[in-house]
Amino acid sequence: MSDKLKEIINKQNAKNEESLVQSDDVVQLVGFIIGEEEYAVPILAIQEIIKPFPWTRVPQVPKYVVGVFNMRGAVIPLIDLRLKFGLSPKKQGDETRFIVLRHGDDIAGFIIDRLTMAIRIKKKDIGPAPDTISGDDTVIDGVGKQEDRIITILKVNKLLERDF
Amino acid sequence: MDEFQEILQDFLVESFELIEQLDQDLVELESRPEDLELLNGIFRVAHTVKGASSFLNFDVLTHLTHHMEDVLNKARHGELLITPDIMDVILESIDLMKQLLFTIRDTSADAGVDVAECVSKLDKCVGGTGEVETPVAQETTPAEEVASEPESSEDDLDYENMDADDLEAEIERLLQERQNEDKAKREAKIAAGESVPSLDPTPETEEEAPQEPTPEPVAPTPVPAAPTQPTEDVKAAAPAKKAQVVEQTIRVDVKRLDHLMNLIGELVLAKNRLIKINEDVEERYEGEEFLEELTQVVSIVSLVTTDLQIAVMKTRMLPIGKVFNKFPRMIRDLNRELNKKIELELYGEDTELDKSIVEEVGDPLVHIIRNSCDHGIELPAVRQEEGKNETGTIKLKAYNEGNQIVIQIDDDGKGLDPEMLKTKCIEKGLITAKEADNMSDKEAFALIFKPGFSTAAAVTNVSGRGVGMDVVKTNIEKVNGIIDIDSEFGVGTSIKLKIPLTLAIIQALLVGVQEEHYAIPLASVLETVRISKDEIYTVEGRSVMRLREDVLSLVHIGDIFEVERILDSSEHAYVVVLGLGTSKLGLIVDTLVGQEEIVIKSLGDYLKGIDGVAGATIRGDGGVTLIVDVLALMDIAKHVKATAIIDSSSDAALLTQEKMKASDYTIMVVDDSQTDRMIMRKALEPLGVTLVEASDGQEALSILKQGDHHFDAMLIDVEMPRMDGYSLAKEIKKYNRYKNLPLIAVTSRTGKSDRMRGVESGMVEYITKPYSSDYLSSVVQRNVNFKSEFL
């Protein structure tokens, strides 16, 4: 039993070292689902992830800007990524979360369908966005490939850019 | 002399601030050279520094900034691309500007040791700019710049090649020359009987300045100016120091005051929240003893908070005189420069307002007054021809008006010609001919605030670049102020700046429309009126009502903020009469919620510039409420067409679907007792209907609002925590779409009054506990028109 334990500990240590060595080439992301797709944003851009709470509608903005909400005294815009990505609106459920993203002084909350997990991905496993949608205007930063799935990595500064 | 010191101090503080900003902006500009907004901002800073330094007679600085301005102006008009090389020079010139300012600061308080150094630095700077400007100018616009610049650069090179001794000698010579000149002039003046303040020589140099560059190019001009300035200042400063008395004041860093103000803001929010909680507690524990104590404490806290807020606000108050004081001098100098006779009259210098606002209005006033002098007041000869007093008058007044301070600048000059303004704007492509046709005179006057607009034919030291009035608008808008401009052609112009006393905390009227709340600044609310819907008339597609003798045009707040009409509208509505300047507007709202102190928070960059919304505030319950921008609202109201206020009761949600099977019937069970819910479930399960459970009124309401289910009936317990059955029923009946939803009370209260309350709140059936399951089932079946074939 103790042998087995040791083995496991050794393995873990080895893994840790491995990841330490590679930390330069590894990107840490947080993955989430919108509609059918999995998306991710860099973990450092995330200010916090919170459960939904009430917001106030704001007039004269596109449908996907659902309003503003109070986060500990700051008034922050709330954007529904489903609507922004052209999907049909969906009722918020138990798994719905607000991800608050920050880039410089820009800050906004984004409604996502559900979180998946924190992802470590090697830089070499991230491919560019498909040619048809690449360019400065796209919100897609790149496409991360993992064994069984493909994750679309989003540009935080583009998400926070006002486009209306 | 004290006055001069004060102005100088202000100028230094302001300039350092501006330069700090400039550094950041320029660096940003290098990465985004095509950003016009940024360029405009930088240009405005240079312009402002130049303006201020020119009337303080810092010729060296004026000269330097003037050239910077030229470069930036070119860039702004797209004639010059900011390359790293040019940026180096601009940054270098800013460094020089800084050193120059430090020198001014030090020498005016101390002995003028640094003068020679300052002069040589200036030489370098002018040389630097000249050298780089020349090739660039050749590339892009070979005409004007080349003509003047090479001369100066040549000359500067000379200076650079000189060794220190020669330079010293040259400076000495020029200095001597200038001083003699000054002396001669002053004597001549004294002879002429004019009173000559000791600082007089400096304006003379200003007069000389334009002439010198031709025979004896640019660089030398400022040379005499710099030495004269500090030496004079030293004289000025010395007696001032002696005169100082011990004052009962402490200097406090503004940052600390700002921090204090922020904390007060948070405190006000917390206070609002406390009051709200207190109200809730009062409702629930009516008559309990501790309640009185709580209420007392809450009212003390709220009182003290309000006092504290006023006290802190007062510490930040400064008399507007601080800004006004520099204008007499400016007018005097402008008189000489423009060969005009202008008198300045000041009123209400004691009027106090927030420090941050005092700072913001300084620049705009400089620009407005310079503009009045340059474009408004005519030359003495012209005035005489027109039968006016030879001397023009500019009146600068400050006074309080409600929660606002009004700064009024009146001149008796030639006034604005709306047609000419429109033509100019069309020429410059700022507006289209069609827009011009639809403009009222007042709107045409406002054109002078457009960026890039200038009526002056030539760019002078005073104005004509088309940025000044733009600065006015930007700064005044920054402090939520309003500019009101009025003019009569040939008679004069009157500009009113209406500025709120403080920025952070205001009194607001909270109004409700459907389920939303909005805050309207109380300063703009004249009165509120309750009207019935048939008092609203429609004239040419607009809603109006009679308010005493007047006809008031109306607009529904829901039409402006695109509010969805989900609630049943009552027969009555409230009209909030808004007043701003001379215009009035009636805003129809559903409910008046009350008056509250609110802390203004910005919506941030992402949502800025939403028409009609001035910001947001956080309410006692933690929710966000939008603040109405009354000025914008009045604008929007012009274009909103009246929708029928009596809304049709056709609601799409009322469409009931054909029931195909028993489970198509959905019934909500609302009871706080798990057991009771179980009993009801047991009674209804045999029917095969879908059941949804909620444990109190609030939960029930939110399930209903989510709209996941289409309910055919609700079983409601009367006594529940958070929201009881009666309140729930009342809330539900507010919605159009639930008008016909059967609500069945299930309760152990059997009193007659209880039943009456049930009926009043909109319940259709009243089942008393205990009941048999068959009875419950049959009541439900009856109310949902349960099809017998499903049994």
Image (spheres, rainbow, N blue to C red):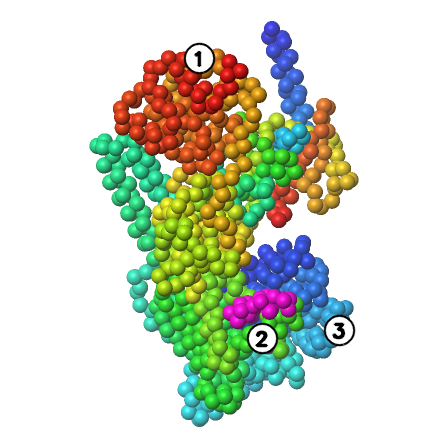
Provide the secondary structure element on which disc 2 rests.
helix
Asked if the magenta segment contains residue B399, the reply would be no
Quarter assignment of residue B739: top left
For the point 47% across and 72% down, which residue is it?
A: B486
Circle 1 SS class? helix
Q: Nearer the viewer, mark 1 or mark 3?
A: 1
Q: How many marks?
A: 3
Q: Earlier in the sequence, mark 3 or mark 2?
A: 3
Q: Amino acid at mark 1?
A: Lys
Where residue B410 sits, quadrant-wise, is bottom left
Quarter of the image that includes the N terminus of chain B: bottom left
Mark identifier at residue B682: 1
Q: Position of residue B325 (x, y in %)?
A: 41, 72
Image point 38% across, 28% down: which residue? B763
Tag 3: amino acid? Pro
Work out whether residue B203 can be spotted: no
Disc 1 to disc 2, how far (Cα)?
Answer: 82 Å
Q: Earlier in the sequence, mark 1 or mark 2?
A: 2
Task: Check the residue under mark 3 and report the chain it is in.
Answer: B
- C-alpha span from label 1 to label 3: 95 Å
* Residue count near mark 2 (Cα–Cα under 10 Å), binned few <14, some 14–19, many ≥20: some
Q: Which residues are magenta?
A: B431-456
In the image, taking residue A123 as reference, residue B733 lies left or right, namely left
Q: Chain of mark 2?
A: B
Q: Farthest bottom residue?
A: B191
The residue that appears at 41% across and 30% down in the rendered structure is B698
Q: Amino acid at mark 2?
A: Glu
Looking at this view, is B547 or B42 the one in front? B547
The quarter holding residue B172 reads: bottom right
Furthest toward the front, the residue is: B788
| Residue holding disc 2 | B419
